[in-house]
Structure formats: C-alpha cells, structure tokens
Image (spheres, helix red, strand yellow):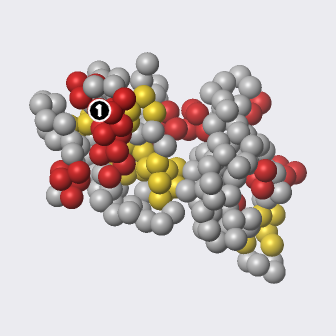
Amino acid sequence: FDAIVFCNLLTKRIMDIEDCVYYTDSSCKRVYTGEDAKRGIKPAFNKKKKGYRLPTEAEWEFAARGGIVQNESWFYPFSGTRSADNHLVYDSRQHVFTDSNLDNYGWYKGNSNGVTHEVGKKLPNRLGLYDMSGGIWEWLFDWYDATVYEENVTNPSGAREGTDRVLRGGSWADEAYESCVTRRFHNAHPYIPHYFFGFRYCRSL
C-alpha cells in the first residue's frame, strides 16, 4: 500500500492529479493517500489512467524475460542469463544453491554478504532493466491467484480479490533459485513491509 501511495505522489508531482491510477473506491472519485494506506483500505485501480503504478504480474515477467518471445533469452531461468551449465549447483559446505552466471546479473544469498546493494551494479537484461533477478522481492499489484497459469488468458491480471499480493524476483537474502523469472512469492499481506521487499514502478503509454 505504501508503494501505491508513492506511485500516486510521483504522478501528482511529475504529471497531474487527474493522471493518478489508484483510488479509494471503484468509482474512482478520491485519489488513494497515505492515510488510506494506514487504514488498510484496498485501492481501486483505474486502467484508463496513464500515471505511475505497480506492474501487473504478467507485465513484470514479460520485462524480466527480456520482452522478445522469439529470442533465446526469453527462456533463460534468470533475468538476462541462463544458469551455469543449465543447472543450479548445490554448495554442500554452505548448504545453499549457487550459480556463477547469476553472480553477474543479480544479488542473492551466495554473493550479497547479507545486505542490500545499490541498483544497477550488475548487468542488465535484454531490455536494459537491472536487478530483476535478485536484489529485493518486488511488489506487484495483482492479488495472488494459484490458478492464473491454468487459464488461457492473454495478459492476465490476477484474481479480483484476495489476501496476498504477488511478489517476484527473489532477494539478496534468498538462494539462487528464488531469483528465477518464474518464481512466485505471495505469503505477504500488502500492509506489511519487510526488509527485503521493495517495488519497481512503471506507467502505461
């Protein structure tokens, strides 16, 4: 919810209040604010608006995979790279999964030294986006839906209601496999922050 407030504030600062995406009600009459977030009000999303917002889960994965379905990189397990020798290596000494290729593209448990790192210090993926594998788990707007991939839907947007929002990307505190572009994390209520949760904002053109 705080990330959503940020998106509205950024929209008002750079664009106009009329461009805000998030509102307190489905009729989209009142822009969502920090007070609404403190009260745990679920925001309504106006898809017609062009302001800053959180990506949908489908948008996030499309971007993480590099955006070109026909390209080989679309099938890489990590954003920007395949795993070393096409498999993850288990380090029996440290009891973690490691991956030498991911070292060049993202921060995870095997290379982060247990702390967050400045954005853009690793290599970008094909779209020029940094840290989409590893770094921090990124809040998305979709409610978690366990069956979303079972439906033949183009550009799905998750469930209409729920208790948990989706997070994607893995983090510096997790093993390498959590940074896979297909990995979904949802055990997180949208009003609870965490030291390895963050967000990436976008906007419709």
Q: Quadrant of residue 136?
A: bottom right
Task: Left or right? Give the position of 134 relative to 40.
Answer: right
- Direction right: furthest residue: 85
**Residue farthest front in this picture:** 13
Give the residue at x 42% y 28%.
Answer: 203
Image position of 19 with respect to 38: above or below: above
Residue 40 visible from this viewpoint: no
**Image quarter hosting the C terminus:** top left
Tell me residue 181's x, y (percent): 62, 45
> In terms of secondary structure, where does tag 1 sit?
helix
Residue 27, image x, y percentages: 12, 30
Q: Residue shown at 47%/59% (left/top)? A: 197
Circle 1 residues within 10 Å: few <14, some 14–19, many ≥20: some
Residue 89 in sight here:
yes
Q: In the rendered image of this protein, does residue 96 appear above or below residue 134?
A: below
Relative to 205, say whether 166 is above or below. Answer: below
Report x, y in % for residue 152: 46, 29
Residue at 70%, 39% in the rendered image: 124
Q: Quadrant of residue 163?
A: bottom left
Q: Residue 26 is drawn in which quadrant?
A: top left
Please report the residue visible at 28 percent of the width from the left and 25 percent of the height from the top.
Answer: 16
- In the picture of the structure, the residue carrying the numbered disc 1 is 12
Residue toward you, 164 or 7 = 7
In the displayed image of the protein, which residue is found farthest to the top? Answer: 205
Expressed as whole percent of the image width and height from the top left, the position of residue 119 reads: 62, 49
* Residue 91 placement, left or right of 189: right
Between 125 and 160, the residue placed more toward the observer is 125
Residue type of the residue flagged with mark 1:
Lys
> Is 40 left, or right, of 150 in this rendering?
left
In this rendering, the count of numbered labels is 1
Left or right: 19 as drawn, with respect to 108: left
